[in-house]
Image: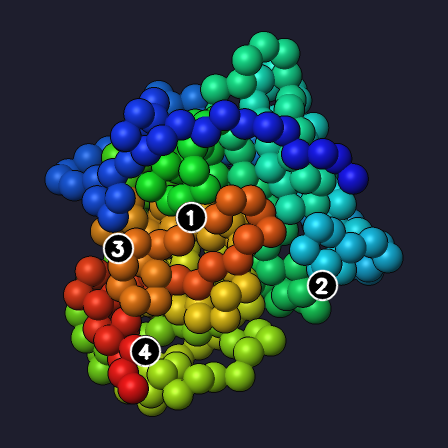
Amino acid sequence: MRRPLKLKRASPSRSVSKPTGNSPAGGNIVPTTDSPWVERFLVLHRQVRDAVMESGRAESGARNAKGDDVKLFDLAANDAALAALRKLKLPVVVDSEESGQLKIGSGTPRHRLVLDPVDGSDNWARGLPLSALSCAVLPVDAFLHPDWVEAALVGLFDQDTPLIALKGSGAWRGKDRLQTFSVRTVARAMISIELNHHSPSPGLTRLMSAARGVRSYGSASRALSLVAEGATDAHVDVRGRLTAESYLAAARLVIEAGGWVTGLDGGPLATPENLTDRVSLIAASSRELCARIAEVLGKG
């Protein structure tokens, strides 16, 4: 097992990239196609998607650092992602769910890539379409928090065009800008709730009863990206099991599309130290809906 690299982490007030928090890009803007990460993401998505499609769905017999079963397509996707990144000849630190932390390229890295080659592995193994490649780009010394994500990719395996967000420039599928639906009340909201390995608490039961509709997808990056696309109005994970590689990129999509991401109390989202630390979150189409959901969860 690889020993994690020791990264010197800057304090938020001194970081090379000041966090914007839940402040999406505004106005009538166009995709920032001159960002090098757009083309890099397109190549990364294509190569990982091809590797997953060509791989079997069987288990490999191995487990990752979180103790999850590793499928053959997980390994193929991770290998394809690392190969694609090596071809860029760009010095980066890669934190992957499957291979841990390693440095790629020569020179001093400026960026850290937090990678989940296949988020929703169990879905893909069973032939369900709810899974995706997730990749978040942060300054190398930054905290594992959506505020620090400079570029984000959620690449669906059943679609050719990935979802891409650039900090301060919006979130996009190709030339189409993503926009949340801006629902502000629980009674009108279609909410996805992660229930895997969890028995609903009284607060969560109240939320499920009050919402217009409830769905459960088994893939954090896909559930969050549906909020960014305006297909659902919120995603809630109260289990304390969610790890950064699964939500960092998609949370940035939500923010850039006009949404809001918080902890369960409506306050700032927790900042994990590594990819094995676990959090809970609320992501919603508006600040008001986030607050209403936190209120319902916290009653009693």
In which quarter of the view is residue 264 placed? bottom left
For the residue marked with disc 1, what is the amino acid? Thr
Depth check, mark 4 against mark 2: the one in front is: 4
Q: Position of residue 277 (x, y in %)?
A: 55, 53
The local secondary structure at tag 3 comes to loop
Quarter holding the C terminus is: bottom left
In the displayed structure, does residue 84 sit left or right of residue 291?
Answer: right
Q: Is residue 251 visible?
A: yes
Residue at position x 47%, y 52% from top?
Answer: 247
Label 3 belongs to which residue? 259
Q: Are marks 3 and 1 in contact (CB under 8 Å)?
A: no
Mark 3: give few (<14), some (14-19) or many (20+) Cα within 10 Å. Answer: many
Instruction: Name the disc covering residue 235, or none.
Output: none
Residue at position x 28%, y 30% from top?
Answer: 13
First reached walking from the N terminus: tag 4 or tag 2: 2
Q: Are marks 1 and 2 in contact (CB under 8 Å)?
A: no
Marks 4 and 3, how far apart at CA: 19 Å
In the displayed structure, does residue 18 sit left or right of residue 193?
Answer: left
For the residue marked with disc 3, what is the amino acid? Gly
The local secondary structure at tag 4 comes to helix
In the displayed structure, does residue 124 sit left or right of residue 287?
Answer: right
In this view, the residue in front, 273 or 211, is 273
Instruction: Name the disc covering residue 297, or none.
Output: 4
For the residue marked with disc 2, what is the amino acid? Ala
Depth check, mark 3 against mark 1: the one in front is: 1
Instruction: Name the disc covering residue 125, or none.
Output: 2
Marks 4 and 1, how far apart at CA: 21 Å
